[in-house]
Amino acid sequence: MKRLLRILLGILLAPILAFALFLLAFTLLDYRPDAQEELKLNGNASTKLYADTLSILTWNIGYGGLGAEQDFFFDGGLDVRPNAEMSAYYLNGILGFLASQRGVDVLMLQEVDKDSRRSYYTDQEAEILKALPGYASSFAYNYKTLFVPEPLREPYGKCMAGLMTLGRVAPAEARRHALAPDADWPIGLFMLDRCFISWRYPAYFSDGKDLVLINLHLSAYDDGTVKKQQMDSLAAYLRAEYALGNRIVAGGDWNQLAPGSQEQELGIPVPVPFPDAGWNWAAAAASTNRDLSTGYQPGITREQTIDFFLLSPNLKAVEVKGMNQTFAFSDHEPVLLRVCAK
């Protein structure tokens, strides 16, 4: 009888022990970036400074997996990833669009995959560099895990992805700045470690002050608590740079609604003012993101504006416009800004 009880106890404890070992392994292998890290600069770029007006494009490319035909399990859909043919189609569309934007001074991209199951382990950073010869670039991981266990029917698997900034002129400095992660341990082992990239151009304008460009992608699936922590960290950085007289542009996927957005009931709006009075939001009139519970249906699918820019008080927007692609290659649309010094 005792032997039988030991066997039954072993059967009951085995899955618990296996799960504990699973968590231990992923805890030991967890990506733990420093608060700030210097980033490597790749590619080739000019050393000539820009004209007085600077053009900047931001685009969350959705890792080449969220084109118009796709839904997504985390948003109420069924798909985990497109088939290999559609994945290649989306990525080629993204690369074609980026190649057509070679005149743009700076490109801020989000959800660029390096080695992920969801994008068939394609090195999208390398492919983007090929599409944009003559640009310098830097890449910062914000998603780095060997295995995402959900959904159970078809696990997301390995995910290596992040932010990528490219410029026709190489910056003097590129850095990764850590933000609050999406979740605490143990769920955080399989979620994103958020960050922003800063590029610095010393004495960019005639008054000798620096120009700082920030590429960011804030949390998506939270009640606003994590986003507030991230926004507080960003605000501290912005205030410190502006106190030095520097000019700052922050752009990307805020996962918050633009000021004055017509979709206010659908999500959390960015705070106004932010970080202080005098700073200006620059958002396109057009929607920049679509719902992923189904494939895209124009006029039916819910849309919102969550991709835009923030300018320090010593800069002004000359133009900001959405670049309509009917969400053909990503669940986000690109946004182009032209900005100059005040």
Image (cartoon, grey):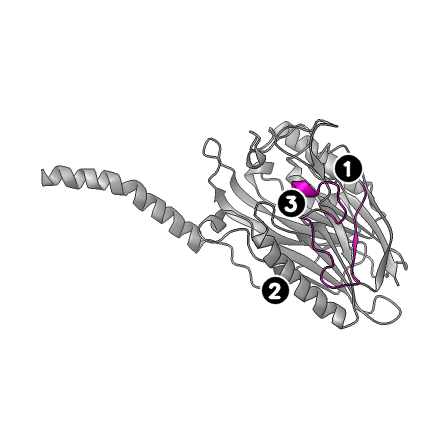
Residue 9's spot in the image, x, y percent?
20, 41
Instruction: Please say whether residue 171 is visible from this viewpoint.
Output: yes
Residue 59 percent location from the top left of the image: 73, 45
Tell me the quarter of the picture where residue 68 sits: top right
**Residue beneath the point at 52% across and 38% down:** 156
* Amino acid residing under circle 2: Gln
Q: Nearer the viewer, residue 314 or 35?
A: 314
Instruction: In the rendered view, tell whether residue 173 sits above or below residue 69.
Output: below
Q: In this figure, which residue is indicated by the disc labeled 3?
A: 111
* Left or right for 226, reference 340: left
Residue 278: % across, % down: 80, 63
Please, what secondary structure does the residue beneath circle 1 have?
A: helix
In the rendered image of this protein, does residue 21 appear above or below residue 69? below
Q: Nearer the viewer, residue 66 or 73?
A: 73
Give the residue number, with chain letter if any, for mark 1: 96
Alpha carbon of mark 2 to alpha carbon of mark 1: how far?
Answer: 33 Å
Query: Alpha-carbon neighbours of circle 2 within 10 Å: few (<14), some, or many (≥20)?
Result: some
Q: Quadrant of the N terminus?
A: top left
